[in-house]
Image (cartoon, grey):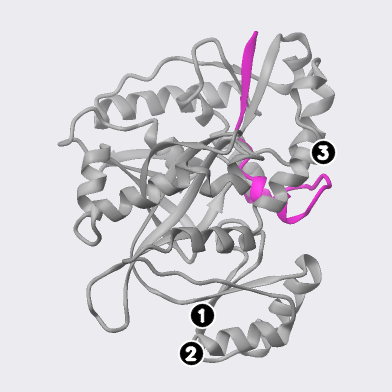
Amino acid sequence: MSTLHIFNPEHDISLANGMRKVTPPHAARQLRHDLGFIPALWANEGDMVLVDDYACAYLSYMSLRKSVKRVLGLDISEMFFVESSTLSNLMISDVEPWGWDYSLKSSILPVISDKDIIPSDHYLSTVRELSHREVSARLLKTLRFNGTTGEALACSTHDEAVAAIYNFGGHAVVKAPWSSSGRGIRFVNGHIDEMLSRWIKNVLTKQQKIMVEPQYRRIIDFGMEFYSQGNGKASYCGLSLFSTTNGAYTGNLLATENRKREIISRYVSLDLLDKVRDKVCSFAFSPITSHYTGPFGIDMMIVAPNNHNGYLLHPCVEINLRRTMGHLALCLTPADDDIQGLMQIVFEDKFRLRISNG
């Protein structure tokens, strides 16, 4: 009996569309086709990885193994790839996707012989509700120690959203409660034009609420990666230092935990970092960790306050109840503090996972 792993990068889009099956946009479908092999990096021996095209996945994974060996000095094992047409004939004991949602369940259920290993609609609805950015805003308050910052307001009307934007001095970030890779994020710099106003009204119509946050002078984007045990507690997996452009992921630093902690310690104390980590692992996060089992990540950032006096930690920009690129980067952690790499998703003739010297 084996675990079946699935890379479904359209997960966040599916959450935004609720409890129904959706057709992902072309870019998401191509990303899944081209990078469907990446669960091989965290799968265990004897597991299987579902891919759209066996030959494409095998060649891409072999190329990645060479890059990882050359840049990081790591040996990653071979993996067993399967296509959906063969699933009904295989003995599968568990399914571990990038993230669980109703659309994935609808597509995988007909080809899985043991229906009991697929989560219930009630569980998937709970995961969706917990993925709402208002939940992140509430849990942010439990992480507000001295040396931290962060505020997010959930607005139910257009007038509330406009008032919140101007409450933050007209410089704000407006976010859809469920969105993907920067698609549901708008930056406001002093003026609310007609296009932004229409977008806010459209989000409210579709998702009933909209989030408004102050803009920060961002210094470093990073995250903490965890695994929720489903019993009210979480285990810590490691730090993730990453880069974004307009809210969209662009790359991850590949380095040891010691090296990443050293970088962050240039701006905030490691004691504060550890206090936030320990709080997430405690029952303080039980609204999530009691109802969700699996990997999750918390995006954070180091910011410079307007008074130019030191730096502050924003401990919870958002929570992703799924595996993240940070979890993937942790699978490629060098064994030596002196070795450092960069992991990027690039598009050339197709999407590629590029590992280079960092």
Secondary structure at numbered mark 3? helix
* Residue on which disc 2 sits: 169
* Residue on which disc 3 sits: 121
Secondary structure at numbered mark 2? loop
Q: Which residues are magenta?
A: 1-27
Q: Which of the two discs, 1 and 3, sits closer to the camera?
A: 3
Q: Is residue 116 above or below residue 89?
A: below
| CB contact under 8 Å: marks 1 and 2 | yes
Residue 76 placed where, x, y %?
38, 20
Residue at 77% of width from left, 54% of height from top?
17
Residue at 56% of width from left, 49% of height from top?
320
Q: What amino acid does circle 2 point to?
A: Gly
- 329 left or right of 82 in image: left
Please tell me whether residue 13 belongs to the stretch shown in magenta: yes
Q: Is residue 34 above or below residue 208?
A: above
Secondary structure at numbered mark 1? strand
Q: CA distance from mark 1 to mark 2?
A: 8 Å
| CB contact under 8 Å: marks 1 and 3 | no
Residue at 32% of width from left, 52% of height from top?
273
